[in-house]
Amino acid sequence: MVWTDELADDTVFVSPPPAVTHPLATVVAPLARRFGYRMTYPKYEDPGFWDRHVEQPRL
């Protein structure tokens, strides 16, 4: 729901219908943020994280 709330400006989720997701995101997203959920996490944006945790193909 945090994603739904953050992407609502330019993204339409079609399943479940917007009539369901918009009000649900309005209620649930602030609660999720209060519990520490975020749209992105800095540790996952660091390429080094993926090098250490995911087997990368040799190019």
Image (tube, rainbow, N blue to C red):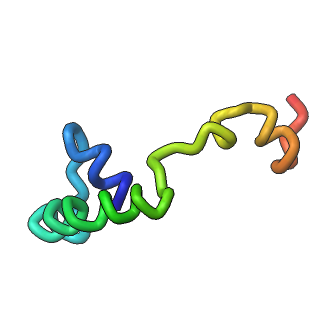
Q: Position of residue 36 (x, y in %)?
A: 50, 57
- Side (left or right) of 22 relative to 38: left
User: Furthest-front residue in view?
Assistant: 34
Q: Position of residue 41 (x, y in %)?
A: 58, 44
- Side (left or right) of 42 relative to 7: right
Please tell me which residue is depicted at 29% across the width and 66% down the height of the picture. Answer: 28
**On screen, residue 18 above or below 16:** above
- Side (left or right) of 25 relative to 35: left
Please tell me which residue is depicted at 77% across the width and 41% down the height of the picture. Answer: 50
**On screen, residue 21 above or below 50:** below
- Point out the image quarter for the N terminus: bottom left
- Side (left or right) of 26 relative to 56: left
Please tell me which residue is depicted at 36% across the width and 55% down the height of the picture. Answer: 2
Please tell me which residue is depicted at 78% across the width and 40% down the height of the picture. Answer: 49
Q: Position of residue 12 (x, y in %)?
A: 21, 51
Q: Position of residue 54 (x, y in %)?
A: 82, 49
**On screen, residue 14 above or below 54:** below
Q: Quadrant of residue 51?
A: top right
